[in-house]
Image (cartoon, rainbow, N blue to C red):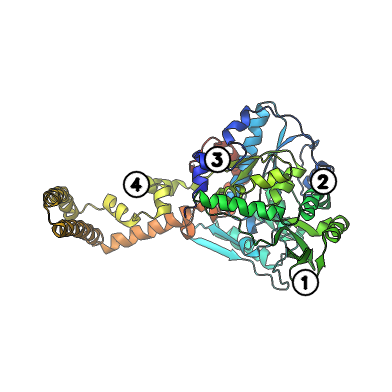
Amino acid sequence: MKNSLYEDYITGRPEATALFSRLPDAMFSEAWTKSKWASGVADALNQTQETLDVAKEYVTGTELVIATGQQPGLFTGPLYTIYKAVTAINLANRFHAAGVSCVPLFWVAGDDHDFEECRSAHFFTKRSDLLSLTYVPREVEVKDMPMYRVPLDAQVHKFIDTVASACRGAEESEEIREFLHESLNKSDSLAHWFALIMARLFRNTPLYIFLPWERAARIAALPVLAREIKSPLAGTQLLLKQGKMLESLGYAPAIQRAENACNFFVERCGRRCNVYFEDNRYHIAGTQETHTVDSMLELLHDAPEIFSPNVALRPVVQQQLFPVAAYVAGPGEIAYWAQLKPVFHFFGMVMPVVYPRSRCVINTIKTSQMLRQYELDSVAVLNNEDLLARTLRVEAANPAVAALNRYRSGLVDLLEEMRHEISGSHFPEAVSAAERFERDVLGGLEKLERRLLHADKEKRQALEARLERLRTLLAPMNKPQDRVLSVFSFLFEHGWELIDRMIAELELDTVELQEMEL
């Protein structure tokens, strides 16, 4: 089964685009009107910006919203988090240019409890190697603990000094280091520190930071959670049905659910617990606690702060709180949004446009020169397309290789002529033998070329070291750069202004991989 839904969506394949409400291109041709936010949310959002030490123009609660978000990560996690925020800002700016009042909003998914995804950060250092740091809380067991409760201890201060010393620096390095220490001292959790850093990174932009675990947000989400509770497993059935539709189209469903699994969590003793519905009762996993529909509704209204939506219900809660025109999503998110259209309809809402985030790879002047010198590009490095052989061909002035290449084309032509003549015979075994012979000869030529190219051991080792530096920057851990490296790999050298440059240089109207040279 293929899983190229993202590629099919961004290229406009009808089977894929039909899974969504509207296409990104249609968004700016619609007539958008003011819509009221959920009660209390605008005031809470304004207050949050103040507590995060950023001065923003107060929202009125009637603006259109371009939303995006991410679970908190150490040092903001991978670069794609930053690119999602940048894309949301650029989308909102386009609406503003068209005369529509619109704000970009970043949803800090601090309810998330997958600590393994949040605890590590990776950096490209001034020695052109990869520095990886993993946070292991020393005094608290954080299993199933939402990120807005996960505490940070003194070892993170050591991480800050390690990163600041390891990465390339400039005049602003010390200011950034001091900010990280000061913000960490103010933080009461991993999610809070993440929010403070994001607020500082985007201080000079219109981006608003939203904390969904605040009480005003929990109360505003009540109607969605109440509907979910009143209709046990209805949302789950819709998700599973849509998942089967995806399978019929050849896509692997991103959201897999047990048939008795609910789409919300309940916190108990600071832990996020799954909820199941069996025998006409709700069961809170890991406890002996059960509820009827009525008693679960009563618990929701008495203690909304302990309820949070899962990955499928969170977008619906988001739409309940804000008039979201578009949600900026990465490839993985687009895959799970493909299952959500029936869920939005169930709650009487129109699914927002799902807008692909900008994709970018950051390069340095040196590595750009190296790519040009060896006739490579970022995609070739990511795909690891026999880079050593390619660079050796460019680098080597090898008379033996030159001789091989002179004779190769003639040999290839002769082999093809021989195979075609034998194919005209009526001896299938002879035909297959000729095909095998041709493959063997061509394979032998490739092996001979590699031997000749690798003969100069010293040159080969020097090139291998250069290529390793390229891979570490452009495809660390054999993954796309934006899925691994933290923005702080470059921020210490280029300062806070790096964010402004990203906003200015990343284009909205392309889904292609963009490059930024620093």
Q: Amino acid at mark 3?
A: Thr
Residue lying at 82% horizontally and 46% vertically, measured from the top left? 44
Which residue in the protein does label 4 denote? 373
**First of labels 4, 1 by sequence position:** 1
Q: Position of residue 415 (x, y in %)?
A: 14, 52
Alpha carbon distance from label 2 to label 1: 33 Å
Q: Position of residue 494 (x, y in %)?
A: 57, 47
Q: Is residue 344 left or right of residue 508?
A: right
Which residue in the protein does label 1 denote? 287
Alpha carbon distance from label 2 to label 4: 54 Å
Residue 17: numbered disc: 3
Alpha carbon distance from label 2 to label 3: 35 Å
Q: Position of residue 475 (x, y in %)?
A: 46, 55
Alpha carbon distance from label 1 to label 3: 42 Å
Q: Is residue 334 above or below residue 144?
A: above
Q: Is residue 274 left or right of residue 480?
A: right
Q: Amino acid at mark 1?
A: Thr
**First of labels 1, 3 by sequence position:** 3
Which residue in the protein does label 2 denote? 44
**First of labels 2, 3 by sequence position:** 3
Q: Is residue 414 left or right of residue 467?
A: left
Q: Amino acid at mark 2?
A: Ala
